[in-house]
Image (cartoon, rainbow, N blue to C red):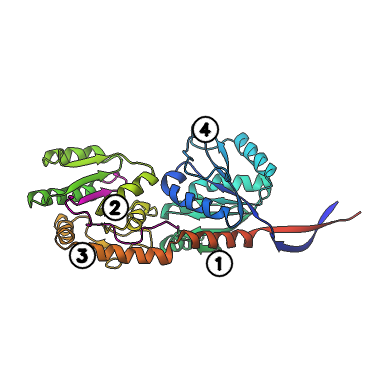
Amino acid sequence: MGVSTGQSKASAGPVRLALVAGADTMRHIGQVVQHLTVGLVDAPVHVTVVAPASVDLSNLPSPPVGVLTYDLDWFGKPTRRTVEAIGSQLAGRNIELLHALDGTAHSLTRKLSEVGDWPYLVSVLGLGQSSRLTPLGAHCKAVLAASMSIRAKLLSRHVAPPEQIIILRPGIHRVRQANCFARPGRRPAIIAGGELNVYEPFSTAIKAFADLVQSHYDCVLFIFGNGKAEHRLRVQAQRLGLMGIITFVDRMPQHQLADVFKAADVLVYPHSNGMLEMDVLQAMAAGIPVLVGGACVGDFVMDAETAISYSAASQADLTAKLKMLLDEPNNGIAMAESALAYLGEHHSPAQMVADLAALYREHIVRLQTVKVS
């Protein structure tokens, strides 16, 4: 029979890793996952992505990244048979470690860890995701918080010992210099974006847009997103005579949204839903200034350093700050440059990959066994 000697060592060869995505993972952090998989190929790490069959994975470099898909039941969860099938396929690929890419993927990852006796890590991207981690599986080696406020939330809920909760900020590619107010003869483009689930903050943004129109500022105005408040917001815009001026645009994939921000001049982010504000991060990475209407989860939102804060309930405050940017575009350029410098220091894709590759190696333990007759 085989027994453990009690000795262990870190994996010396390429790590064989499975990145596990939930139903909403790719919609929220698709670009981050793309940067991660591309970088890990050179780490070197052998990567398999496990994701719902309904998710678009066309942006991943496959091959060399392997892909396994699974179906969800009526309740949006994988069945026991699905878990066993995925576990068998991962075992066939000699997987050594699992990484749940966000809290929505934790349940599946925990079950897979039990099926294959694999260690796993779990990333947490929102304040509310801490409730999805209870209980942590016995094989969980680390909880990766995307910001300091998320880590504080995890600590307050005693999800794991402090030494197991690690800050791991998402990496994102950025432009080299500010990309706003730099197109002669073109009207400035202002986007108010996010999930349109709360009426009042976005209503304030529409009223501020109306103020700009009444003050004869010649801008192109957009509302980006979907949500339960969308109909009321459209009615409000129509009532203010703005339906021919403000364009409502449905939510789009992250890689498309990144291109949109590069063609814009300002992002207004009226409300955070408690998840890491990837729209804000992408806008900053595109080189445009961001105005935020309240507290945010991401460490990258710092008033007067990387972003401009305004009161989400004050039409006058938002209007004044938009006019300031339009009247003095150098202020917006300076803010965008400051944000780009911060991202370069704290949200480098290369650093994200290096930090994760080190964690992967640290937490892979190969037990040396001897045969006892």
Q: CA distance from mark 3 to mark 4?
A: 53 Å
User: Which badge, 3 or 4, comes first in the chain's sequence?
Assistant: 4
Q: CA distance from mark 2 to mark 4?
A: 32 Å
Q: Amino acid at mark 4?
A: Asp
Contact? badges 4 and 1 (CB < 8 Å): no
Q: Which residues are magenta?
A: 171-198
Residue appearing at x 69%, y 60% in the figure: 12
Q: Amino acid at mark 2?
A: His
Q: CA distance from mark 3 to mark 2?
A: 26 Å
Q: CA distance from mark 3 to mark 1?
A: 44 Å
Contact? badges 3 and 2 (CB < 8 Å): no
Residue 69 is covered by the magenta coloring: no
Left or right: 325 as drawn, with respect to 154: left
User: Which badge, 3 or 2, comes first in the chain's sequence?
Assistant: 2
The disc placed on residue 73 is 4
Which residue is the site of mark 3? Answer: 330
Contact? badges 2 and 4 (CB < 8 Å): no
The disc placed on residue 163 is 1
